Image (spheres, helix red, strand yellow):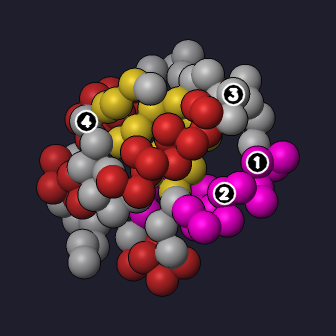
Amino acid sequence: MREFSATQLRDYLTSDSNNPLLLDVREPWEFQVCRIDGSQLIPMGQIPASLQALDPQREIVVICHHGIRSRQVAMYLEYQGFANVINLAGGVDAWARDVDRRMATY
């Protein structure tokens, strides 16, 4: 599993050749407070039941609040055969601090 800092992910997403799925694994109330544009919400507890909805060949960036839940989900996805998984270290909290200071925090 690869891991990106918030600034690395920002730079990665601005490249024309990269179009990963931004998979937010927080709870719906957290997603309502703030989110990275273009991210898709599937709460951590729903990941096992949602595996068929995910493309195991597509690059997936897993996102949570601080990077702990997303790391667990990224490891789970790799165990399930997903080969192109990236964890956002520091989560949306780091994104708000280092990339988008207008983003709400909690």
Query: Dot 2: within a 10 Å radius of its alpha carbon, few (fewer than 14), some, or many (20 or more) residues?
Result: some
Q: Position of residue 53 (x, y in %)?
A: 81, 49
Upstream in the sequence, badge 4 or badge 1?
4
Judge left or right: residue 77 versus residue 72. Answer: right
In three-dimensional space, the C-alpha distance between marks 4 and 1, rounded to whole angstroms, equals: 25 Å
Query: Horizontal and vertical percent for residue 101?
Result: 18, 59
Question: Which residue is denoted by mark 3 in the rendering?
Answer: 81
Residue drawn at (56%, 62%), measured in percent from left and top?
44
Name the disc covering residue 5, or none.
4
Hey, which residue is sitting farthest top in the picture?
A: 17
Q: Is residue 28 left or right of residue 68?
A: right
Q: Which residue is mark 1?
A: 51
| Residue type, numbered disc 1 | Leu
Q: Is residue 64 left or right of 59 when viewed as pictured?
A: left
Q: Residue 13: x, y in percent?
A: 44, 31
Q: Mark 4 or mark 3: which is in front?
A: 3
Is residue 59 visible to us here?
Answer: no
Question: How far apart are labels 4 and 3 at the CA level?
Answer: 24 Å
Q: Quadrant of the C terminus?
A: bottom left
Q: Are marks 2 and 1 in contact (CB under 8 Å)?
A: yes
What type is the residue that disc 4 sits on?
Ser
- The answer to whether the residues at label 3 and label 1 have Cβ atoms under 8 Å apart is no
Disc 4, SS: loop
Give the camera-side residue of 43 and 49. Answer: 49
Q: Residue at x 71, y 55 (%)?
A: 48
